[in-house]
Image (spheres, grey):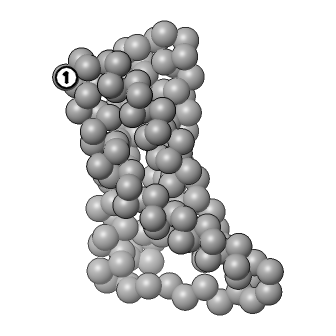
Amino acid sequence: MLQISDLPTINATLNTISAILLVIGYVQIRQRKIDTHKKCMLAAFGVSVLFLISYCIYHANAGSTKFSQQGWIRPVYFTILISHIILAFTIVPLALRTLYLAWREKFDKHRRIAKITFPIWLYVSVTGVLIYLMLYQMG
């Protein structure tokens, strides 16, 4: 049976899958494989939505988790965490706008915003996994 305590691992897994799909989708569009790119990006968006739902459920039930490590890793953790949080808030409207422009077939505008959206979305996904590792797997 799935427990609330299982959700951080599930969330990290969803972030990992999202990052992989984003990279594959990026490679596919560079190779002009538009249909595969579209499928990867829609899947990355779907996985990210599942992550957000799971994340909200976890924090509504478990609250926040304190970072207990000391020393040099502490400022590293908080630097990653703060940048992750700020960019996580910005990625939601960016991803929605990027997907909307593709759906409306406004590909020139889609390409311009995707050049901003992709690295931020990838950073948020990867740093989400790093934060999980630092919180739940260190020490």
Q: Is residue 80 visible?
A: yes
Q: Residue at x 45, y 65 (%)?
A: 86
Classify residue 45 as left or right of residue 74.
left
**Amino acid carrying mark 1 in the image:** Arg
> Toward the viewer: 5 or 53?
53
Classify residue 111 as left or right of residue 96.
right
Q: Residue at x 19, y 23 (%)?
A: 104
Q: SS at mark 1? A: loop
> Toward the viewer: 91 or 21?
91
> Toward the viewer: 17 or 28?
28
Picture quarter containing residue 127? bottom right
Classify residue 124 as left or right of residue 50.
right
- Position of residue 16 measured from the top left corner of the image (x, y, whole percent): 54, 49
- Position of residue 87 measured from the top left corner of the image (x, y, whole percent): 46, 58
- Position of residue 23 measured from the top left corner of the image (x, y, whole percent): 56, 33
Quadrant of the drawing holding the C terminus? bottom right
Look at the picture and state if 20 lies above or below 90.
Answer: above
Residue farthest left in this picture: 104
Q: Residue at x 31, y 83 (%)?
A: 61
Picture quarter containing residue 111? top left
Q: Is residue 138 visible?
A: no
- Position of residue 92 measured from the top left corner of the image (x, y, whole percent): 32, 52
Look at the picture and state if 120 lies above or below 129.
Answer: above
Quadrant of the drawing holding the N terminus? bottom left
- Residue behind mark 1: 104
